[in-house]
Image: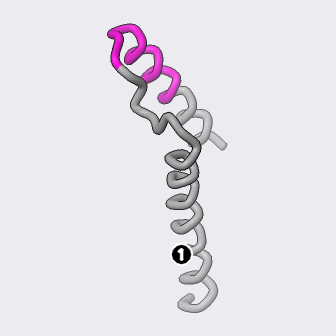
Amino acid sequence: MNEILLATFAGLIVGLFFSAIKLPLPAPPVLPGIMGIVGVYLGGVAYQAIVERFFS
């Protein structure tokens, strides 16, 4: 939970900084980009589960 809060806080700081210097936000602007990020995360979680289940 601590990592999630730190990541959210870091994202807030980066968003404020980029907005202050008038740059586009460094985030995917559309749903497919966001779903791609979710897919990468879920793939990593699935890999860890498979490795722990079959190779531990």
On screen, residue 5 above or below 25: below
Percent x, y for residue 19?
42, 13
- Secondary structure, mark 1, is helix
- Say how many tags the image has: 1
Q: Is residue 10 left or right of residue 5?
A: left
Which image quarter holds the C terminus? bottom right
- Determine the residue positioned at 35% across, 11% down: 22
On screen, residue 48 above or below 10: below
Q: Quick one: 48 or 37, which is closer to the camera? A: 37
Which image quarter holds the N terminus? top right
Chief secondary structure of the magenta portion: helix
Per the image, the residue denoted by label 1 is 47
**Residue 43 is a magenta residue:** no
Colour basis = one colour
- Identify the residue at the far right of this view: 1
Q: Quick one: 1 or 47, which is closer to the camera? A: 47
- Disc 1 marks a residue whose amino acid type is Tyr
- Determine the residue positioned at 54% across, 90% down: 55
| Range covered by the magenta-colored residues | 10-23
- Identify the residue at the far top of this view: 20
- Determine the residue positioned at 40% across, 31% down: 26
Percent x, y for residue 16?
46, 15
Percent x, y for residue 33?
50, 47
Percent x, y for residue 40?
50, 60
Mark 1 is surrounded, within 10 Å at the Cα level, by few (under 14), some (14 to 19) or many (20 or more) other residues, namely: few
On screen, residue 49 above or below 11: below
On screen, residue 18 above or below 43: above
Q: Quick one: 14 or 1, which is closer to the camera? A: 14
